[in-house]
Amino acid sequence: MGRLRRSRTHHAKRDVHRASRTRVRTRDLDQIQSIDLDPKNRAALEAQQLDFDKPGLAQHYCVECAKYFEADAALRAHWRSKVHKRRCKALKEPAYTIEESERAAGLGREGKRPSTTTAIQEDIPS
Ligand SMILES: [Zn+2]
């Protein structure tokens, strides 16, 4: 399954090795969710100063994907793309936290457990 396997495993990432390099590391989903999507920060990111090191002089930036574009047309095409829509959907879900990872490993204190045990203890005498 040459072509199909390749197209279905890398999820619209053209170069998976490139994505793992520190040099090209972009912002994580939880960073975007908690910092960049704040209306104040979002406005600042969308109206950046001219930066000659960034693609398109840092004038065309997608906040959700933390990505610069060369031209306005490219940014608009990106907003209509599957990659961007998938990213927006991922950002709507709550961010993965340390508490959640501890709960998954059975380490965290579950919020509902104390109340259920007290409810059971109250039931036994009566
Ligand atoms: Zn985007």
Image (cartoon, rainbow, N blue to C red):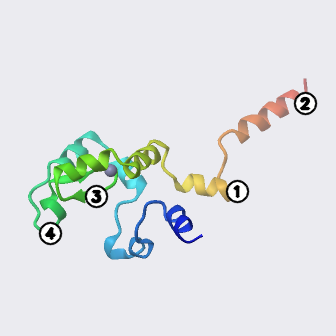
Mark 1 and mark 3 lie on one chain; the one further toward the N terminus is 3
Mark 3 burial class by Cα count in 10 Å: few <14, some 14-19, many 20+: some
Mark 4 and mark 1 lie on one chain; the one further toward the N terminus is 4
Q: CA distance from mark 4 to mark 1?
A: 46 Å
The residue drawn where x is 19% and y is 48% is: 46
Mark 3 and mark 4 lie on one chain; the one further toward the N terminus is 4
Give the number of the disc on residue 124.
2
The residue drawn where x is 69% and y is 38% is: 112
Q: Which amino acid is tagged 2?
A: Ile
Q: CA distance from mark 2 to mark 3?
A: 59 Å
Q: Which amino acid is tagged 4?
A: Asp
Q: CA distance from mark 3 to mark 4?
A: 14 Å
**CB contact under 8 Å: marks 1 and 3:** no
Of circles 4 and 1, the one toward us is: 4
Q: CA distance from mark 1 to mark 2?
A: 27 Å
Residue that badge 3 annotates: 67
Determine the secondary structure under disc 1. Answer: loop
Q: Which amino acid is tagged 3?
A: Lys
Give the number of the disc on residue 53.
4
Q: Quadrant of residue 24?
A: bottom left
Disc 1 C-beta below 8 A from ligand 1: no
Residue 76 vs 104, above or below: the answer is above
Mark 1 and mark 2 lie on one chain; the one further toward the N terminus is 1
Determine the secondary structure under disc 4. Answer: loop
Q: Which amino acid is tagged 1?
A: Gly
Give the number of the disc on residue 28.
none
Disc 3 C-beta below 8 A from ligand 1: yes
The reply, left or right, for residue 95 in relation to residue 62 is: right
Give the number of the disc on residue 106.
1
